[in-house]
Image (tube, grey):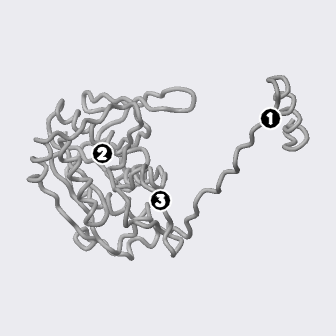
C-alpha cells in the first residue's frame, strides 16, 4: 500500500498572530511553526495502514525551507520519505494553486491512497485535499473518523450533520481526517534520530513541469486580513438579592438590549 500524506506547516495555535503592514500577511518573526493538527491525524492513520498492509508513506507539502521541519516531524513519527515543493513563485495563500502543484507532484509518485487533514487551522479553507482529488480525478471522502481497507476498496465512516455516514470507495482515492480518527503518536527519540537520515526530495515548479502561467485559472488571492472585532466588556448586574438581580436583568434585556 503506497500512501501519500498531504501536510501543511502552520502557526501554533498558542502563537500571538499580528498582521503585517501590507494588510495581507502575518508577522512571522516570533511565530512557532508546527504540523497542522488535522494532518497529524492523517500521518498517524497512514502509518497504521502501512504497518497493517505493507508499503510506504510519503509526506508531500509545499512551502519554504522551514516547512521541512514539519516533514521531519512526520518522518520521526514513522513516515518513510518526504517531498517538499519549494518555489518562491508559488503563493502559499493561493490554496487552489498549491493544490494544483501538490497534485502534479503526486502524479510523479506511486500511490494507492492519499490522506490529508480535513482543514488547516490557519486559513480554515477545507479546500486543498478535495481540490487535489479533483485534479487527480480520484474519489474523495471528507471528514473521516474511521476507515477499513479490504479487497481493494476502502470503507469510510464520515461525520455528517446529525450523525455518521458510511461510504465505500474504490482505490486509489483521497480521504480527509477528522478528529476522532485516531490519537497521533509522539515522535520517539529513536524516531527523531532515524528521521535525520530519511530522504526529503525538494522540487521547484520547473521540476514538476509547471510555471506561474499554469495557475492563471487558480485565481484565489488574499486581498486583506483583519483581526476579529474586540468584544465589549461584560456588564455586572447589581442587586441585593437573586430576585432583585433577576428583575434588573429582565429590565435591561427588555428596555436596553430590546431582545425580549
Residue nearest the observer in this picture, 185 or 99: 185
| Mark 2 element type | strand
Question: In terms of image quadrants, where is residue 92?
Answer: bottom left
- Compared with 185, 79 (above or below) is below
Mark 1 and mark 2: span between their CA atoms?
Answer: 58 Å
Q: Position of residue 77 (x, y in %)?
A: 20, 42
Point out residue 148 in the picture as x, y percentages from the top left corner: 30, 28
Q: Secondary structure at mark 3?
A: loop
Q: Which residue is mark 2?
A: 114
| Residue drawn at point x = 24 percent, y = 51 percent | 59
Question: Circle 1 — which element?
Answer: loop
Residue found at the far front of this picture: 240
Label 2 Cα neighbours within 10 Å, binned few <14 / some 14-19 / many ≥20: many
Determine contact: label 2, label 3, CB under 8 Å.
no
Sequence-first disc among 2 and 3: 3
The quadrant of the rendering that contains the C terminus is: top right
Please rate how many residues cluster around mark 3, counting C-alpha atoms within 10 Å: few if below 14, some from 14 to 19, many from 20.
some
Label located before the other in sequence (1 or 3): 3
Quarter of the rendering containing residue 145: top left
**What is the C-alpha distance between the residues marked 1 and 3?**
37 Å
Q: Are marks 1 and 3 in contact (CB under 8 Å)?
A: no
Question: Which residue is more in the foreground, 199 or 136?
Answer: 199
Q: Compare marks 1 and 2 and give the one earlier in the sequence.
A: 2
Residue at 28% across / 47% down in the picture? 5
Name the spot of residue 60 as percent of width and height, x first.
26, 54
Task: Give the numbered dot on residue 238.
Answer: 1
Query: Is 34 left, or right, of 25 in this rendering?
Result: left
118 relative to 32, above or below: above
Q: CA distance from mark 2 to mark 3?
A: 31 Å
Which residue is at 13% across, 42% downward?
A: 189
- What residue is pinned by disc 3? 17
In this rendering, the label closer to the viewer, 2 or 3: 3
Amino acid at each position: 500500500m503506497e500512501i501519500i500524506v498531504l501536510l501543511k506547516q502552520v502557526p501554533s495555535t498558542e502563537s500571538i498572530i499580528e498582521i503585517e503592514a501590507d494588510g495581507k500577511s502575518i508577522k512571522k518573526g516570533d511565530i512557532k511553526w508546527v504540523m497542522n493538527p488535522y494532518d497529524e491525524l492523517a500521518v498517524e492513520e497512514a502509518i497504521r495502514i502501512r504497518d497493517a498492509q505493507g508499503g510506504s508513506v510519503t509526506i508531500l507539502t509545499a512551502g519554504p525551507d522551514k516547512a521541512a521541519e514539519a516533514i521531519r516531524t512526520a518522518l520521526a513519527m514513522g513516515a518513510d520519505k518526504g517531498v517538499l515543493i519549494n518555489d518562491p513563485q508559488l503563493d502559499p495563500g493561493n490554496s487552489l494553486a498549491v493544490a494544483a502543484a501538490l497534485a502534479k507532484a503526486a502524479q510523479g509518485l506511486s500511490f494507492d491512497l492519499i490522506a490529508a487533514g480535513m482543514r488547516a487551522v490557519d486559513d480554515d479553507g477545507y479546500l486543498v485535499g478535495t481540490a487535489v482529488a479533483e485534479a487527480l480525478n480520484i474519489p474523495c471522502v471528507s471528514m473521516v473518523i474511521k476507515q477499513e481497507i479490504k479487497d481493494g476498496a476502502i470503507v469510510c465512516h464520515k461525520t455528517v450533520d446529525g450523525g455518521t455516514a458510511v461510504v465505500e470507495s474504490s482505490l486509489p482515492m483521497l480521504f480527509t481526517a477528522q478528529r476522532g480518527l485516531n490519537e497521533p503518536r509522539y515522535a520517539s527519540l529513536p524516531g527523531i534520530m532515524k528521521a535525520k537520515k530519511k530522504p526529503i526530495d525538494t522540487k521547484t515548479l520547473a521540476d514538476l513541469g509547471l510555471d506561474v502561467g499554469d495557475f492563471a485559472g487558480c485565481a484565489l488571492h488574499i486581498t486583506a486580513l483583519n483581526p476579529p472585532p474586540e468584544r465589549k466588556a461584560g456588564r455586572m448586574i447589581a442587586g441585593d438579592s437573586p430576585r432583585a438581580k433577576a428583575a434588573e436583568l429582565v429590565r435591561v434585556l427588555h428596555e436596553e438590549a430590546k431582545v425580549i
